[in-house]
Image (cartoon, coloured by chain):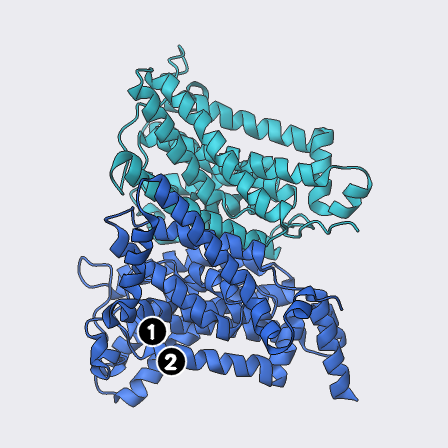
Chain colours: A cyan, B blue
Amino acid sequence: MEALPLAGLLVAATLRIAVPYVFAALGGFYSERSGVINIALEGMLLTGAFACVVAAHAAESAGLGGAVAGWLGVGAACVAGGGLGALHALICVRFGANQIVSGLGLNLLAMGATKFLLTLVFGSSANSERIAGIPSWDLPGLASWSVTRVLFCTPLVLLAVLAVVVSQLLFRRTVFGLRLHATGEHPEAALSLGVPVVRLRWTGVVLSGALAALGGAWLALEQHQFTAGMSSGRGFIALAALIFGKWTPRGAALACLLFAAAEAVQIQLQGGALGIPTQFLQMLPYVVTMVALAGVIGRSRPPAALGRPLEPLR
Amino acid sequence: MKARGTRVLPGILGRWARPLAGPLAAIGLALAAGAILVAVLGQDPVTVYTTLFDAIFGSAYGFGQVLFKATTLIGTGLAVAVAFRAGLFNIGAEGQMYLAGLASAAFALALGDGCPALVAVPLVLLAGALAGALVALLPALLRAFLGVHEVINTIMLNFVAFALGSWILVEKLALFESVHTAEIPAAARLPRLETMLPAFRGAPLNLALLLQLLLCALCALALWRTRWGYEVRAVGLSESAARSAGIPVRRRLVEAMALSGALAGTAAANFVQGYKYYFEEGFTAEAGFKGIAVALLGSTHPAGIVPAALFFGALDRGGFVINGLVPKEFVDILQALVILLVIVLARPGDVAAQVRRLALRRREEVS
């Protein structure tokens, strides 16, 4: 029985790799469904990771336990990511400026600012000091097998699953979800029906930052430190997953799992999987997303008003 | 038409002052915010900024470095601007430039030493431009014929380009245990300007600068002095209006995007043919993304792109010299602030008014 442990390892690795993708893709979901393009997911992940480490490290230095410090870090990540989201909303919703450029600018800002602060806080431009992280729970029966340990005993994984389920229900079953949907499809029509379009967009974009930052916090807690540029393109893979998943929480989460599985295979099998070069596996998320957008297999269609600021009513 | 700015600043002054106001205000505000940040850290903003200024204008060598960094940014900025004028957002300049660098290095290596420089240099430049255009062609065709928004596809293609480039490099071209190719033959290299102007001694400034300035002039002529350019700009302002005016919209979209990719491709020459003489992993150093900022800061006009590229190039260079005072990423923060401020302060004008103006001129041409 050689295959079963390997399969278990692969599934566990897939789940772990998928966590930051899922959080960031969900973040992208709230922003883009409200009609605001968010290519700043990358910067939001990075900001979340950094805020998490700074807060957790400060808490540990103040004598708090590793787990408590870790949760404080998660909270700090949400606040910092939400802050970056608020900046995006200010630029794009309040001032109606170009959403793509704002996202690019915020990515550059996050990249520069985290390195800048890293040097100031930890005296190194490469990495922070070590943090303990949040230990997984020791639940009897579940903690012994790798897959169930990741899925049921790791708090942030559970949170990610919960976030997907809640988002999907919110989107399909609640007034908020319906209004968010309408805001992204036809904001003027929504506005004329009394939907608070501007407020919904602010909510969507700030939530987007907070959720993406959770993904960053996961990265930091997993690696027990912050390293410069540690998001390394994950925000864009999450964006690809969101598009491949047709801008729905469930679809995006499944796409994240698919992309993460490809990555897990690549890592576990040391690159030489089925004779496919590593670089081609790296391309996979982007290529399938382009194919999906082109409409070859079940066309993926963006929200109709994506990228268009609300016309001021005169 | 209620153009408030023009009434206050009439004539030629108004024509120049209006597009300048937004970018200059953005730069001013970003520098002010930077000064506050420096002061908060307990450093003297004046010292930081004078150190920065000295490094840029204090010596011909320093200014040569700035010009060298600006050269690449003029190329990518121009690439983004040309696409922008056609209403297309080319976020793929980074990947286009990346594969163009690889293609030109590979082509130069295949060409070997037998070819005279007058033939080899333009051929290698052309190979790079062609590669850049080819990378841009896919999102262009998808946009023109399937209506898929080019933003997502160009972002995705960047990552495909990095992975593909890295595979080709590792499998075929890289020197043993390195991430770069062998040096290209001397005939394919662009001469350094220090050989003509000794003051620039030591700075990697090369003929690519003149090439980029020439391309800027050519693009300005093509966009504003030819029928083709008029049609491209018309497509950029309103596709439906352009279509009803009989302009082949799809063709112009594809052509503009291919030109944009080709221009991004030539930006690689500054490094590959003018500086290191090889292709290296990561040589683009975000120049493609910064090109977007340069294009917008320069009001997507060639005449604005050159100073905007100089500004960004100066900040790129400045990071190294202020590192003792504040972390060098200070300049990255400044660049990001400029981008964020410029899109808020200098929104691309009253588009409706521009459409009306174009329509008027069209009618005059017809009658």
Q: Report the front residue among B226 and A257.
A: B226
| Image x and y of residue B145, in percent | 64, 67
Helix, strand or loop at disc 1?
A: helix
> For mark 1, what is the residue?
B269
Callout 2: few (<14), some (14-19), or many (20+) C-alpha neighbours within 10 Å? some
The chain ID associated with circle 2 is B
Helix, strand or loop at disc 2?
A: helix
Q: Considering the image in quadrants, where does the C terminus of chain B appear?
A: bottom right
Q: Are marks 1 and 2 in contact (CB under 8 Å)?
A: yes
Identified by mark 1, the residue type is Ala
Name the disc covering residue B211, or none.
2
Residue beneath the point at 37% across and 23% down: A146
Name which of mark 1 and mark 2 comes first in the sequence: 2
Q: Is residue A184 above or below residue B72?
A: above
Q: Are marks 1 and 2 on the same chain?
A: yes
Nearest to viewer (mark 1 / mark 2): 2
Residue beneath the point at 25% across and 37% down: A123
> Left or right of B202: which side holds B352?
right
Identified by mark 2, the residue type is Leu
